[in-house]
Amino acid sequence: MRKIYITEVAPRDGLQNFKGVVETERKIRFVNLLSESGVDEIEVSSFVHPKWVPQLADAEEVFKGIKRKESIIYSAITPNERGLERALKVGVDKVAVLTAASDTFNRKNINTDIEGSFRILEPVVKRAKEEGLNVRGYVSTAFWCPYEGKVSPHKVRELVLRLFEVGVDEVSIGDTIGRASPKDVYELLNMLLKDVSVDKIILHFHVTYGMGIANVICSYKDFGIYRFDSSAGGLGGCPYAPGASGNIATEDVVFALREMGADVKVDERKILHALREVGLPVNSSIGRIF
Ligand code: HMG
Ligand code: MG
């Protein structure tokens, strides 16, 4: 049985859309506390345009301030070459590039369509690989798009395969607006896992329709998916995806998977401790109990 691999995305996905101010020192403390929880990877920030995502304008300072643990990968989003340059200067362990299965969402999110996203991400992947970094590709709006509606799984499969051709090491498949149900997950994974190893796929769920944990359980149990993105306290949301609510909460995911008999190393109490220590809100089922 493969150990569950958790990428904790609260410092990035959680804070990119956060309504209050979270000072740099508080972010650093948050990442350091999350490092004690047993998560495998922490997406620390995004090297995006500060006008597009002002909440993460301090990505360099956060990376410089955190205390890194050998066993944890500290990653970041780098949507373009400028972002990668900035990330390389502060020694990120791994980078992520962005595309989405919808032209409209891509335009709103990164100011270009699907074809344009590949033109921008290809040199980023090439250079990151030359620098010896692992690269994640994100496919957002992989089930539903806030602008274009239901997304075809064929289109998602095509984009995932194209990202691997470009040279990414893994793909995170995003239900950006939290609209996917297990039916959508079955439809996509039945198709995708014929061509792609389960070791290279990560699922990234949001919770708007309340299906996030059900999606985790069915993808784990019926398809052997063991890598998930989740966010402490269920923080999260994309500023360019209207109606998107938080990510699936790390504490709920690890509780659910452990109950299913999975090998889970994350301590949900330490996740909750990290949130409370830095005064961030807790919006999860487990958070209401412990
Ligand atoms: P653009 O305006 O098209 O950029 O933005 P540009 O290349 O035309 O450059 C314009 C100016 O911006 C230039 O400055 C650049 O130097 C500067 P000027 O010469 O005019 O003075 N610039 C930058 N500065 C700092 N850092 C940079 C950078 N790039 C350009 N990296 C861009 C294009 C991609 C940068 C912009 O659209 C952007 O930053 N978008 C990010 C949006 C974002 O972060 N969205 C949220 C993350 S995605 C998400 O949440 C979904 C996910 O969670 C999965 C899921 O849930 O599905 C991942
Ligand atoms: Mg997200």
Image: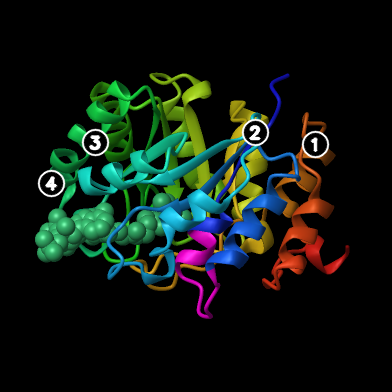
Indicate the secondary structure of the residue bearing disc 1.
loop
Q: Please tell me which of labels 2 and 1 falls first in the chain.
A: 2
Report the magenta stretch's main SS. Answer: loop
At label 2, the amino acid type is Tyr
Residue 29 rendering spot, x and y as whole percentages = 66, 59
Q: In the rendered structure, which segment of residues is drawn in magenta?
A: 13-23
At label 1, the amino acid type is Met
Residue 239 rendering spot, x and y as whole percentages = 38, 69
CB at disc 4 and ligand 1 closer than 8 Å: no
Q: CA distance from mark 2 to mark 4?
A: 33 Å
Residue at mark 1: 260
At label 4, the amino acid type is Gly
Residue at mark 2: 220
Indicate which disc residue 116 carries: 4
Q: Is residue 58 left or right of residue 159?
A: right
Residue at mark 3: 124
Q: Is residue 265 left or right of residue 62?
A: right
Q: Is residue 143 magenta?
A: no
The residue sitting at the bottom extreme is: 20
Q: Residue at x 54, y 62 (%)?
A: 14
Q: CA distance from mark 2 to mark 3?
A: 31 Å
Where is the N terminus found, in terms of image quarters? top right
Indicate which disc residue 37 carries: none
CB at disc 1 and ligand 2 closer than 8 Å: no
Q: Please tell me which of labels 2 and 3 falls first in the chain.
A: 3
Indicate the secondary structure of the residue bearing disc 3.
helix
Q: Residue at x 34, y 65 (%)?
A: 146
Q: CA distance from mark 1 to mark 3?
A: 39 Å
Image marks 1 and 4: residues in contact by CB distance under 8 Å: no
